[in-house]
Every structure is written in structure tokens, then in C-alpha cells.
Amino acid sequence: MNINATLIGQLITFVVFVWFTQKYVWLPIIAALEERKKKIAEGLAAADRGVHEQELAQKRALDSMKEAKAQAAEIVGNAKKRADEIVDEAKDQARSEGERIVEAARSELDLEANRVREELRSRVAELAVVGAGRILKREVDLAAHKDIVDALAAEI
Amino acid sequence: MSSDALTSSEYIRHHLTNLTFGQLPDGHWGIAENIEEAGQMGFWAIHVDSMFWSILLGILFIWGFSRAAKNATTGVPSGLQNFVEWIVDFINDSVRGSFSAKNALVAPLALTIFVWVFLMNLMDLIPVDVIPEIAKSMGIHYMKVVPSTDPNVTFGMAIAVFLLTLYYSIKIKGLGGFTGELTLQPFQADNIIVKILLIPVNFFLEFVSLIAKPVSLSLRLFGNMYAGEMIFILIALMYSAGLGMGLFGGVLQLGWAIFHILIITLQAFIFMTLTIVYMDMAHTEH
């Protein structure tokens, strides 16, 4: 219970401890705390930014989806129109081709018929003469009765 | 347990005596053998036990805290760092709450006071005979393990705080401002003659309140811890009074120890808060 030099020793010890605490305890810990505070604030800000950006991206995605849909619809419409056109064209072409083929066939037919007719005609006289010759047993001369035969052939 | 040779009052006196190193009556320097010798040593003696335990606890404090500070990361804190940061945060809030000026010294000062005083007070919870008996078996006769029950320890810290407040008072307000604070209030007058007449009265009042600060700061801590220690000693006396009293004493000791946890924390906190307040008063003009 005596007051003595312990007091001075304690005073000096105390000062040393305070100095040490300030230098090696307080400042590093406060620095770490401040830095962490900053880091957390940055993290929160980044999260906010992220949410905002996500919203924007969603909006953008929605927009482009809408645009794509519209484009697709347009493309489908165009394609349908084009297909109709193609079908119509094809129909027209087919029809005209058919007509052309039919026409060609008909004219060929006509030609053939004419040719056959010409041949028949040219050979009718011969046939008639052969027939008549057989009937008349050489009594008829081709040269003498040519006018009659020709008249007959013309009637075919 | 008190040894058979001791009476109750001798037991108590023994527990309240520090291990004192100083000049013995025959002129040699050494450890005082008994209470009378310790008393005769005068001012130039030192309480070896108080110094040993307070420095040991102080080193424990700065070792633990500086280890946490050195490894402090900005990531997720774990274990020791978390605990240290919690205390640092608490001190920081206290300082921000009561200290309005800017001074980088105040917060570390408060931290040192709070943890160190708390650790010194915590020694009170160790049963009063454990460490003295161990010391006795090592040949050391006196061992007071709670440094804060030594008025030298509390006065040493209070005087350090007092000197700091004086230093900052004069640094912030100037010598004139500080003197004015001591002499020109609380009684003020416009008339210059009345003003001069009031100076002695003012100085007396202000000087007493100035001196009262370190005295009350140290005596409050000392008184509380000394009384708590005394009650532990008295309870310990009951152990030598038979089985029934011994058991009752055990219950009492447990109860008092639990209550004492509150007191030691509160006293450490009060010492710290008052230090912050005194430092704040030194920094602000009235």
C-alpha cells in the first residue's frame, strides 16, 4: 500500500505500451478495416451495376427477339409470296408448254396426215391401176386411162 | 488456504503486501522480508510483483494484438483477427462518441487502457491463494497478483493520462488559454478589478477540479479492485472454518466471481471512457 517508485515504473511501462499499440496494433488494424470497408463498398457498387446491366441486357434481348420475330414473319411472307409466284409461273409455263407441245403434235400430225395422204394419193393411182388391171386383165392401158384414174385419185 | 501459523488478520495482511524491492534498514538493497521493512523503504522501492504481472499482461496484450494486426487481411477475418477487430471497432466507436477533436493518439491510448486494465483486473478472478502458494513453493514470500489493486499502478496510469491532458491543453489552447481557463472561470466579471479579485477563488476551484481528475480516475479503479480482492480474501478465510463454512464460502466465491466479471469489465471501460473525456476536455475550449 506504499506509494513508491513502482508508480514511475508503471508510468513508463504504460507510455511504452501506448506507443507500441499505436504503431503496431492500431494503425495496421484500422488500415485493414478501412480497406475492407472500401472493398465491400466497391463490391456492392459492382453488384448494383451488374443488376442494372443485366436488366439492360434483358431488355436488349427482348428487343432483338421481337425484331427477329418480325423479320422471320416478313421472310416467311416473302417466301410464301415467292412460292405462289413460282407456282403460278410454273403453271403458266406448263400450260404454254403443253399448248406448244399439243400444237407441235397437231401440226406434225397434220404434216404426217398430208404426207400419208400424198403417198396414198400418189399410190392410189398405182393401186387403182393394179386393181383395175387385175379386174380388166391387161385390157386397160395405164397410159390410155390415166385421165380417168387421176380424176379418181383427186376425189380421195 | 491460510497456513496454520497465521491468524486471520495476519493472513489478510500477508495477502495485501507486495513483494517489495528496495533499500533494507541495514543499507543493503534487496527484497523486504516483512511488512515493516517494506514500509520503511520509502519512495525508492519497487513492487516487483505488480511490475512483473502488469508487464507480463501488457506484453500478452500487445503480443496477441500485434500478431492479429500483422496478419490482418482485408478478406473474411477469422478467429483472433475477428476478436481483435471487434474490440478495435468498439473502442473506435467509443472514441468517436466522446472525442470530438482530431488526435491519432487517443484511440490507441483508449485501446491500451481498456485491454490492459481489463487483463490486470482479470487476475482478480484467479483464486486468491493459487499463485501466492506457487510463489511460496519457489521461495517468494509475498505475491500480490492483481496489479490494479496496487495504487502505484493505477496512479501511474492516471498520472500519464494527466500529463497528456496537460500537454494537449497547453498545445491546443496555448499557455495563456490554459491559464485563463484555470483563473477566469467559473466566476466571471466585466470589471477588471473584480476580475483580478476573482482570480484566486477561480484558481482554487479550478485547480482542485483539475487535480481531482487523476486522483479520482486512479482511486476509483484502485478502490473497486481492492475491495473486490478483499472480499475474495475474506471468503477464502472461510475455507479454514470447517466443512460447512467452506462449502458456503465456495458458493459465495462463485457468486462473487460471476458478479466480479461485470465489475472488472465496467472498471476497465470507465477508466477508458474517462480518459477519452479528459482528453476531449483538453482539446476543446470552454
Image (cartoon, coloured by chain):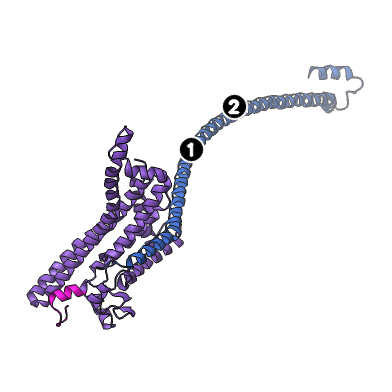
Classify B235 as above or below A96.
below
Any idea which chain is the blue one in this picture? A
Tell me the quarter of the picture where residue B251 sits: bottom left
Q: Colour of chain B?
A: purple
Which residue is labeled 1 in the image? A58
Q: Position of residue B265 (x, y in %)?
A: 26, 59
Q: Position of residue A54 (x, y in %)?
A: 48, 40
Q: Position of residue A115 (x, y in %)?
A: 81, 26
Closer to us: mark 1 or mark 2?
1
Q: Quadrant of the C terminus of chain B?
A: top left
Chain assignment, label 1: A
Q: Is residue A148 left or right of residue B283?
A: right
Classify B29 as above or below B77.
below
Q: Secondary structure at mark 2?
A: helix
Identified at 36% across, 47% down, the residue is B282
Q: Amino acid at mark 2?
A: Lys
Residue B240 versus residue B214: which sits nearer the camera?
B214
Q: Amino acid at mark 1?
A: Gln
Question: Which comes before the other along the chain, label 1 or label 2?
Answer: 1
Q: Which residues are magenta?
A: B2-14
Same chain for labels 1 and 2? Say yes or no.
yes
Which residue is labeled 2 in the image? A81
